[in-house]
Image (cartoon, coloured by chain):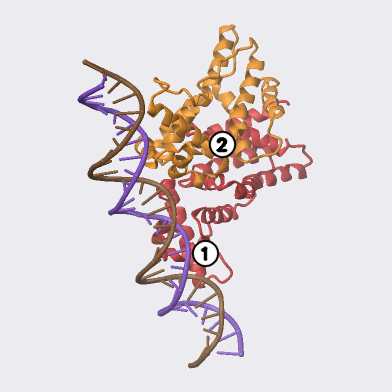
Chain colours: A orange, B red, C purple, D brown
Amino acid sequence: MNAEPPAKRPGGRSARVKAAVHQALTDLAGERDATQLTIPAVAERAGVNPTTVYRRWGTVQALLAEVAALHGTDVPPSSSGDLRTDLEAYAIRTLADLTRPGGIAFFRAEVSPDVDERRSGLRECLQRATAGLDVVLEASRGRGERPPPPERLLDRIVAPLYFRVVFSVPDTGEAYARTLVADLFSDPS
Amino acid sequence: MNAEPPAKRPGGRSARVKAAVHQALTDLAGERDATQLTIPAVAERAGVNPTTVYRRWGTVQALLAEVAALHGTDVPPSSSGDLRTDLEAYAIRTLADLTRPGGIAFFRAEVSPDVDERRSGLRECLQRATAGLDVVLEASRGRGERPPPPERLLDRIVAPLYFRVVFSVPDTGEAYARTLVADLFSDPS
DNA sequence: CATCTAAAGCAAGTTGATTTGCTTTAGTGA
DNA sequence: TCACTAAAGCAAATCAACTTGCTTTAGATG
């Protein structure tokens, strides 16, 4: 979460505004529901003029997209040398991401835009979600192993996590995340 | 899709209005994006005064919820006598439901409401999604079999379908739905 | 330090959804 | 057939997000 020093010149005014707005958005996404996540609200919380936000970002969606894109840029691969361990860590990290205060809001932001933008936005969102997975798989391949294809991992790990978080299914925690990986490894196909 | 005779007195005026509004909503959900799915728009399409819609339903969400709740009331179980066949049919039906013109809009409607309502709305939505599954499992049990628990089927069949539809993953068709069921059956755990 | 400029702030406007008070109409029941 | 009532229609007012033209300011450049 590098909200403080985000851009080129850390001290510039725009940089400060940007940071304040990002922070305000993140906060509000966690506390308010989606319909109240409006530009005036974000601007007020950030102590910034609404016009500024309108001119720089235009829509709440764009803002959410930008913040989402920034988020997770700092996660280090941290490969443990064991595929299963890496996958468990990945699953747990993904789950934590989704269940953090405003986590779902960012997901929603990608699902809601109009059809034109949805394609690209979703692709990007999926890309980000998969990025950590690719690192894990690449490391595995580097070890000379033949890990499962990414689509399989999406189906077996990522999809169930998203589904259960979105539908607030009880008992969706670390233990469950581990179970998903375990099931995968006990499965010969 | 029983849009024509929905309520107690089929000929009543309110019943007619209700049907028209439901139909209009379904149509618009299919053609327009979410941000343009507004009460005035629905009212105009239905040939009804916006005020009426405001007073009867209040919000687009409530309307979507009502229509979603009605939808699928008419699906007959149609058990084939074989679990795998039934599950394939269920998976394909679910996929069709999700990919039909406005399918995602209804899903979104459940995910977006404010936190208070979300719980109950989602529970209901999940219930509906699972209803068909329960029928299939019940039939299986009636045959003296021991089918997998429902959570497992959610993880292995429903979740991947939702995920891939939401993220517009290519090649998400009947063949894929069948693959999900096949994977499940080739898996001993 | 003087100047230049991109971005922020401000103050009206504009737009479109939502509300409200009242009238009209279509079904119901005596 | 004639009141009676719940819901629909209408018109005007409200409210909030968004836009726009202009001014101000902070940081960059010489």
Q: Nearer the viewer, residue A39 or B161?
A: A39
**Residue extending furthest right?**
B144
Residue A189 in view: no
Q: Answer above or below: position of A186 versus A159.
A: above
Do callouts 2 and 1 point to residues on the same chain?
Answer: no
Q: CA distance from mark 2 to mark 1?
A: 32 Å
- Give me the chain letter of mark 1: B
Left or right side of A117 for A132? right
Residue that numbered label 2 is attached to: A102
- Give me the chain letter of mark 2: A
Q: Secondary structure at mark 2?
A: loop
Q: Secondary structure at mark 1?
A: helix
Residue A75 in view: yes
Residue A111 place in picture, x, y as percent: 48, 38
Q: Nearer the viewer, residue A186 or D8?
A: D8
- Dividing the image into 4 quarters, which one contains the C terminus of chain B? top right
Residue B49 place in picture, x, y as percent: 42, 66
Disc tally is: 2
Residue A168 position by quadrant = top right
Q: Amino acid at mark 2?
A: Gly
The circle on residue B56 is 1
